[in-house]
Amino acid sequence: MSRQTSQKIAFAVLTALAVIVVVPIVLVVGYIVVQGVGAVNWEFLTAFPRDGMREGGILPAIIGTVVLTFGTAIVSIPIAIGAAIYLAEYAGDTRLTRAVRLATRKRCGTVSSASSAVEMTTGMVISPSVRLPATMLVPRPRNSTNSPRPNSP
């Protein structure tokens, strides 16, 4: 079987699996929206829960989500910037750094952290048999733009 044929088969299988996963999710979300659209009003969004959390609103959940999002960003952004600077300026060309760069490239095209985790996991497992991004793991010449600079420590 040629490389192009195996690639087409792998893409077809992955597309079919994605459709199998996405269609039920869209149906469930659509059902929830259609059935629940009448319950969403200003009081529901701005009131506190009452009667043992069976009535009232969802304001604490909204506030908690916003606080958690900003807290995560405050912690993760400096770590991400530091890791990016280290990878770009100081890290050598090892198997680990190539794997991290591959995962980063794959993450750039995804929508959420959950989808990127699934994509990176399946991409790492499926790619060697299909030989798609496996070429990115090949060592680069020392004069490439990602290699350490001659005067770096």
Image: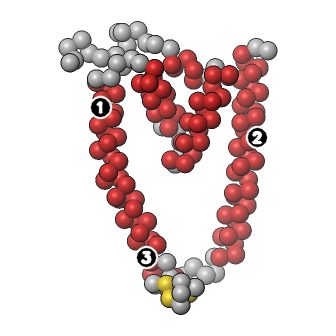
**Place of residue 112 in the rendered image (x, y in percent of width and height, measured from the top left):** 52, 48
Residue position for label 2: 16
- Vertical position of residue 134 compared to residue 19: above or below: above
Of residues 93 and 70, which is closer to you in this image? Answer: 93
**Place of residue 139 in the rendered image (x, y in percent of width and height, measured from the top left):** 46, 13
Horizontal relation, residue 137 to residue 26: left or right:
left
Give whichever of discs 3 and 1 has the lower sequence position: 3
Q: CA distance from mark 3 to mark 2?
A: 39 Å
**Place of residue 149 in the rendered image (x, y in percent of width and height, measured from the top left):** 26, 15
Q: Residue at x 20, y 14 (%)?
A: 151
Q: Quadrant of the C terminus?
A: top left
Which residue type carries mark 1? Ile
Q: Quadrant of residue 135?
A: top right
Q: Residue at x 37, y 65 (%)?
A: 67
Looking at this view, name the residue that lies furthest to the bottom. 51
Which residue type carries mark 3? Pro
**Circle 1: element type:** helix
Q: Residue at x 73, y 53 (%)?
A: 23
Badge 1: residue crowd in 10 Å (few <14, some 14–19, many ≥20) = few
Residue position for label 3: 60
- Vertical position of residue 85 compared to residue 40: above or below: above
Horizontal relation, residue 47 to residue 148: left or right:
right
Q: Are marks 3 and 1 in contact (CB under 8 Å)?
A: no
Badge 3: residue crowd in 10 Å (few <14, some 14–19, many ≥20) = some
**Circle 2: element type:** helix
**Place of residue 52 in the rendered image (x, y in percent of width and height, measured from the top left):** 53, 87
Which residue type carries mark 2? Ala
Horizontal relation, residue 66 to residue 132: left or right:
left
Q: CA distance from mark 2 to mark 1?
A: 38 Å
**Circle 3: element type:** helix
Residue position for label 1: 85
Any mark on residue 131, and which?
A: none
